[in-house]
Image: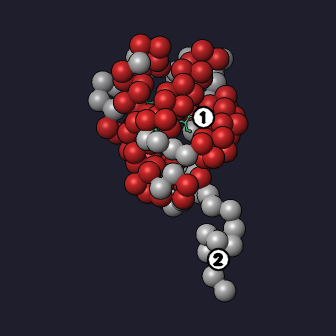
Amino acid sequence: MTETAQQREATPYELLGGDEGVRKLSKAFYAAMDRLPEARTIRDMHKDNLDEIEEKLYEFLSGWLGGPHHYFNKYGTICLSKPHRPYAIGEAERDQWLMCMDVALDDIGAPGTVKAMLKKPFFMIANMMRTR
Ligand code: HEM
């Protein structure tokens, strides 16, 4: 018998609304980074045009949240340490990133259950990106 969403716990990917939801989240994330003065330090690390990075975050998050592994299929890895190595990322920068993600989740109207589910994993992955 094939597995259905009724027989197991839904993945965050499903709870966020699948492909469309993850696209919205990535878009809302960089829109928040772009507009929030509190995220200025990390915004300044990025290129003026955020289209490419928005696509990459969408590809990565899709797999990380339990959906199709677009980033792995395209780049052959899910290790993000190397692309972050050139940047000075400490606690303050990590917290700016997490704040943008919190705002993005609110902006797309993510359910409280999925926000609670993702709180710790997002902290852990963002903390892993620290370079200092
Ligand atoms: C902790 C704070 C973080 C900061 C300050 C940060 C900043 C950056 C910067 C400056 C880039 C390069 C942008 C460019 O090439 O235009 C980048 C790339 C990227 N970041 Fe982050 N990032 C952080 C955490 C994260 C986290 C937690 C994730 C995933 C959940 C993530 C996902 C990505 C992806 C997918 C890329 C593209 C990598 C590639 O070039 O293939 N970042 N990040």
Q: Quadrant of the C terminus?
A: top right
Residue 56 appears in the figure: no
Question: Which of disc 1 and disc 2 is earlier in sequence?
Answer: 2
Q: Residue at x 64, y 77 (%)?
A: 3
Tally of marks: 2
Q: Is residue 79 left or right of residue 17?
A: right
Between label 2 and label 1, give the one nearer the viewer.
Answer: 2
Look at the image and tell me whether residue 31 can be seen.
Answer: yes
The amino acid type found where label 2 is placed reads: Glu
- Foreground residue, 129 or 67? 67
Helix, strand or loop at label 1? It is: helix
| Residue in the foreground of this view, choosing between 104 and 124 | 104
Residue carrying label 1: 81
Residue under the image location 37 percent in, 30 percent down? 31
Residue 106 sits above or below residue 93 on the image: below
Residue 39 is marked as none
Other residues around mark 1 within 10 Å, as few (<14) / some (14–19) / many (≥20): few
Q: Which residue is mark 2?
A: 3
Which quadrant of the structure image shows residue 121? top right
Q: Picture coordinates of residue 73 (x, y %)?
A: 49, 59
Task: Name which quarter of the figure residue 130 lies in.
Answer: top right
Which sits in the foreground, 36 or 85? 36
Q: Amino acid at mark 1?
A: Ser
